[in-house]
Image (cartoon, helix red, strand yellow):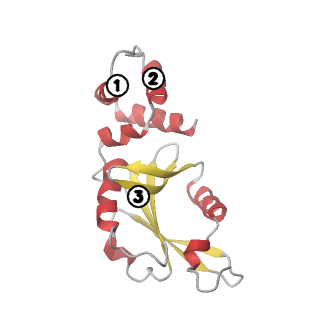
Amino acid sequence: MIPGEPFMTRISGTLFLIFLEETYGKARILEEKRTGSARADAVMITPKILYGIEIKSDADTYARLGKQAKNYDWYYDRNILVAGTSHAAHVKEHVPEWWGIITVERSENGEADFYVLREADANPKVQDKRKISILWRTELNRLLEKNGFPKYKDKSKLFVQDKLIESVPGDILWPQAYEELFE
């Protein structure tokens, strides 16, 4: 432990991952995922929901959060802000009401304790064309195969993304896509 170092910068990633799995069930985490002109600290894939996770340590400010939230809202079914105790009192003022909020405090034994301050609701601004861009071409090819389409080897990734969105109902496409992301 470094004297004067903010507590949130020392949180074990393993503890946070354990908390997420205990809270949300089967999940896969991707770190530092490009999200438009922002970068998501983490993306959590569950069998039915794609989450964007932004982490604000005690040393962070809210200066960039508005732009980050806008980008997250284009890509993810639900979004979560994870904030240290110094932000807990005002964090709700800085993210849309559908965002979930998890706060982190130091327990009596010095470990991190995570608390769900607000559950994430469905994101009304998510865009299918942005969300599908998270998948690689190989994952898109498997989705084409699962849904009886040719591989479109001579077509662009954008063409394939559009074809899937236009042709496969969302209640079929997204669970298949999340399954691919698990792999």
Q: Position of residue 178 (x, y in %)?
A: 49, 39
User: How far across and down, in percent of the image, does residue 84 sit?
Assistant: 50, 76
**Pointers 2 and 3 in contact (CB under 8 A)?**
no
**The C terminus sits in image quarter:** top right
Residue ID for mark 2? 141
Residue corresponding to mark 1? 160
Q: Which three-letter amino acid code belongs to the residue tagged 2?
A: Asn
Residue in view at x 45 percent, y 49 percent: 33
Q: Position of residue 48 (x, y in %)?
A: 47, 44
Number of marks in picture: 3
Q: CA distance from mark 1 to mark 3?
A: 26 Å
Q: Residues within 10 Å of mark 2 (few under 14, many from 20)?
A: many
First in sequence, mark 2 or 3: give its number.
3
- Residue at left 45%, top 25%? 143
Find the distance from the CA under tag 2 to the CA under tag 3.
Answer: 27 Å
Q: Secondary structure at mark 3?
A: strand
Q: SS at mark 2?
A: helix
Say what amino acid the circle numbered 1 marks.
Val
From this view, report whether residue 59 is shown above or below residue 146: below
Find out whether the residues at labels 1 and 2 contact each other: C-beta distance under 8 Å. yes
Residue 96 visible at all: no
What is the C-alpha distance between the residues marked 1 and 2?
A: 8 Å
Residue identifier under label 3: 79
Badge number at residue 84: none
